[in-house]
Image (spheres, helix red, strand yellow):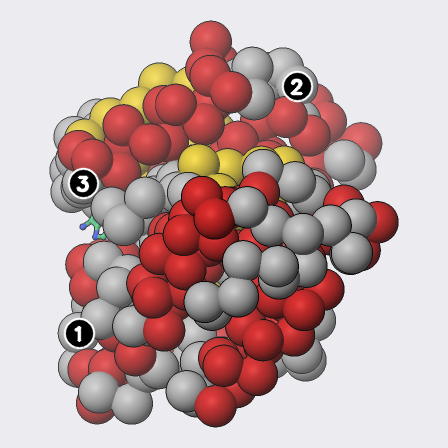
Amino acid sequence: MANPQWTILELLKWATDYFQDKGVSEPRASGEVLLAHALNLSRLDLYLRYDQPLGAEELARFKALVVRRRAGEPVAYITGHKEFWSLDFKVTPAVLIPRPETETLVEAVLEVFRTENGKRKTENWFLEVGVGSGALLIALARELPPTRWVGIDLSAPALEVARENAQRHQVAGRIHFLQANLLAALKPEPRFALVAANLPYVPRPDWEHLPKDIKDFEPREALLGGEDGLDLIRPLVRSAAGILLPGGWLALEVGEGQASQVGTLLQDTGEFEEITSIPDHLGIERVILGRRLETK
Ligand SMILES: C[S@@+](CC[C@H](N)C(=O)[O-])C[C@H]1O[C@@H](n2cnc3c(N)ncnc32)[C@H](O)[C@@H]1O
């Protein structure tokens, strides 16, 4: 990278080859996003200005980003941004980087609440447990006005990021954020039309095998769900019916291979009907839905 005459396209090719050689995942996309970030351009702009030469300062800025990516740091933490549901979210190492599969949970909830039956419930309170960056509840709050939300997380720094994202997307006035352990801070009375959660669900034996980008950089407490991955989902399922309105919905993201076990957890409470699982874009059963019985 000593040549001061590098053009955008040459540098992009160099970065892709370098990342590939060093075993960095998504080498081309990493190079594009980081170069666009260093030059304050969009990814499309890179190709529109492909033959533009870079100045020494721009090169130095890009090089610093390349060094971080080479060490495994996820692109989203380096740039401080991640797109989810076509919205731009601030992310920091205090929060999980929102994943595309979580959009399955958004779609599942929208499907339920856009029916006539669900529409009547949007004047009630909705809840997300484990908000992280706020991506899920902010996407849903925007799609389902005028819903009012409680957003819970155990992590104070995560809640700070979620609050900022809620401001950015103009839904802060409809969300009350709360630092708490699962539902412990809520009165056990039926108040919510929805309890949604994407809680940590990685089983301990799988932890060691996670890619370095995830294991060494994303918050452990946002990922690890105990021995079988269900340490947090289990108590949430047990207590959710107590705060759900009759006919209200529990919507959970689960890990690969956990859907039938979590479905059974809902079944065993005797409090839910219409228990279904929904696959994500890769065909993995990703979301469990259950409807709180009307008569209990
Ligand atoms: C997998 S992340 C999901 C973040 C976000 N909802 C998303 O989908 O991108 C799980 C979140 O649950 C939070 N969490 C972990 N244990 C918790 C607990 N006992 N009570 C409340 N939140 C918890 C973590 O801090 C983390 O932000």
> Is disc 2 surrounded by few (<14), some (14 to 19) or many (20+) residues within 10 Å?
few
- Whether residue 177 is situated above or below residue 30 in the rendered picture: above
Q: Which mark is residue 158?
A: none
Q: CA distance from mark 3 to mark 2?
A: 27 Å
Residue 145 is marked as 2
Residue 268 drawn above or below residue 19: above
Q: Residue at x 35, y 82 (%)?
A: 211
CA–CA distance in space, label 2 to label 1: 36 Å
Q: Position of residue 228 (x, y in %)?
A: 24, 82
Q: What number is the disc on residue 155?
A: 3
Single out the residue that lies furthest toward the right: 48
Mark carried by residue 226: 1
* Mark in front: 3 vs 2: 3
Q: Is residue 123 left or right of residue 79?
A: right
The secondary element bearing badge 2 is classed as: loop
On the picture, is 194 further left or further right than 139? left
Q: Earlier in the sequence, mark 1 or mark 3?
A: 3
Kindly identify the amino acid type of the residue bearing the numbered disc 2: Pro
Q: Name the quadrant of the C terminus.
A: top left
* Residue positioned 26% across, 38% down in the render: 158
Residue 286, quarter of the rendered image: bottom right
Mark 1 → mark 3, Cα distance in angstroms: 18 Å
Q: Secondary structure at mark 1?
A: loop
Q: Secondary structure at mark 3?
A: loop
| Tags 3 and 2 touching, CB below 8 Å | no
Residue type, numbered disc 1:
Gly
Task: Indicate yes or no: mark 3 CB to ligand 1 under 8 Å.
Answer: yes
Q: Amino acid at mark 3?
A: Ser
Assess mark 2: CB under 8 A from ligand 1? no
Q: Earlier in the sequence, mark 3 or mark 2?
A: 2
Crowdedness near tag 1: few (<14), some (14–19) or many (≥20) residues, C-alpha within 10 Å:
some
Q: Nearer the viewer, residue 2 or 105?
A: 2
